[in-house]
């Protein structure tokens, strides 16, 4: 069974090597592909000098466009399973095998790594958690299913979902919207507890200034996806 | 409507029309996209030249002053055009995204082939 880790990277020169090392050591069954979203730092040079597998986007597309490129790569290279694995050191590769096993054993379409089932590891700041609880509530209203960590980027999925995401994926802040889309399409989604770290380098894509836009945009997107 | 205002609006419309025409000639703007602006200019010019037409319509729709009707119409058409542009930008954005992704994946494939 071919498994791929999609690593979206924008200016991750400080953490990209660590991320790949973590994958190689703790999830050796997974191939990986770095999607370098037109970084302005040394990410591309580091990837090339270490001969890492990398797709360099010639134009900056934002997180959604980058991750979608990863799903397209998974589709064209005929992978059975793909997982999104952040390039900033927030995700731990040691959970990937268990997530893949759950996906296959329980015949699911997607498994989301959730920080809020066992409440271990980095839990994000208070205001962010409030936002996450709100999206969790909104998704429950729209789909009837409970996703405790709808903003988690650590998501593993099968061929069906790879196909869906390769064709259509939200551009920015994609997680809550894209999970609503596949729930509405009748796909089976479960969560399992994982621990995440605080980012080791780089900055979050959600600055305080953008958080209002984030809340409004994602709410609207989830509502639209839920009504489809 | 005051004759001075009508002359003023008329001159502005003619100038705008000529400006759009030269823009087409110099290939600053595509005819497909310029057409709607030319239509707006001509429409407002007609209403400006024949005020009885404008007065009739504005009475029918309950505008107190015909000139308000003229401004409202211009504003409405501009809004429609701007929304059309927003839609166009969204589409262009999507097309650029798809081309970027295809290009990046192709380049990756080429590099992998030359490596091995």
Image (cartoon, coloured by chain):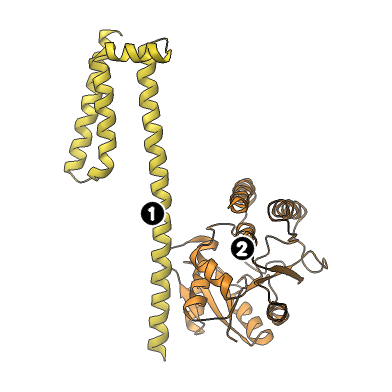
Chain colours: A orange, B yellow
Mark 1: give few (<14), some (14-19) or many (20+) Cα within 10 Å. Answer: few
Q: Residue furthest left?
A: B25
In the figure, A167 relative to A226: above or below? below
Task: Pinpoint residue B36: horizontal percent, then vertical percent.
Answer: 29, 36
Residue A219 on image: x %, y %: 64, 48
Residue drawn 52% across the image and 77% down it: A74
- SS class of the residue under badge 2? helix
* Relative depth, front residue between B48 and A49: B48
Count of numbered badges drawn on the protein? 2
Corner quadrant of residue A205: bottom right
Q: Residue furthest bottom?
A: B116
Residue at the spot 50% in from the left edge and 76% down from the top edge: A75
Q: Locate residue A99 relative to residue B1 in the image: left or right.
A: right
Q: Secondary structure at mark 1?
A: helix
* Left-right relation of B110 to A6: left
Q: Give residue B110's position: percent from left, percent from top.
A: 38, 82
């Amino acid at each position: 069974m071919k498994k791929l880790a999609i690593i979206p990277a924008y200016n991750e020169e400080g953490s990209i090597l660590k991320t790949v090392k973590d994958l190689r050591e703790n999830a050796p069954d997974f191939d990986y592909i770095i999607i370098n979203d037109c970084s302005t730092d040394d990410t591309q040079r580091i990837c090339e000098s270490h001969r890492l597998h990398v797709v360099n986007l010639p134009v900056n597309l934002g997180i959604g466009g980058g991750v979608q490129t990863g799903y397209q790569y998974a589709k064209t290279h005929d992978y059975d399973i793909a997982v999104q694995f952040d390039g900033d050191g927030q995700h731990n590769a040691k959970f990937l095998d268990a997530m893949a096993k759950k996906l296959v054993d329980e015949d699911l379409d997607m498994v989301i790594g959730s920080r809020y089932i066992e409440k271990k590891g980095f839990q994000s700041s208070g205001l962010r958690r409030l936002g996450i609880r709100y999206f969790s509530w909104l998704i429950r209203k729209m789909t009837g299913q409970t996703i405790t960590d709808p903003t988690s980027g650590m998501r593993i999925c099968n061929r069906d979902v790879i196909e869906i995401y390769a064709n259509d994926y939200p551009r920015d802040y994609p997680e809550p919207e894209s999970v609503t889309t596949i729930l509405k399409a009748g796909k089976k989604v479960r969560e399992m507890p994982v621990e995440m770290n605080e980012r080791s380098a780089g900055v979050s894509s959600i600055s305080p200034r953008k958080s209002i836009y984030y809340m409004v945009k994602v709410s609207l997107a989830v509502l639209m996806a839920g009504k489809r | 409507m005051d004759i001075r205002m009508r002359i003023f609006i008329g001159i502005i419309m003619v100038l705008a029309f000529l400006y759009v025409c030269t823009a087409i000639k110099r290939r600053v703007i595509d005819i497909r996209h310029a057409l709607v602006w030319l239509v707006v200019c001509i429409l407002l010019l007609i209403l400006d030249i024949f005020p009885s037409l404008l007065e009739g319509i504005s009475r029918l729709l309950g505008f107190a002053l015909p000139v308000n009707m003229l401004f409202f119409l211009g504003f409405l058409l501009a809004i429609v055009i701007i929304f059309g542009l927003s839609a166009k930008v969204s589409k262009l954005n999507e097309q650029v995204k798809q081309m970027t992704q295809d290009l990046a994946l192709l380049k990756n494939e080429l590099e992998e082939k030359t490596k091995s």
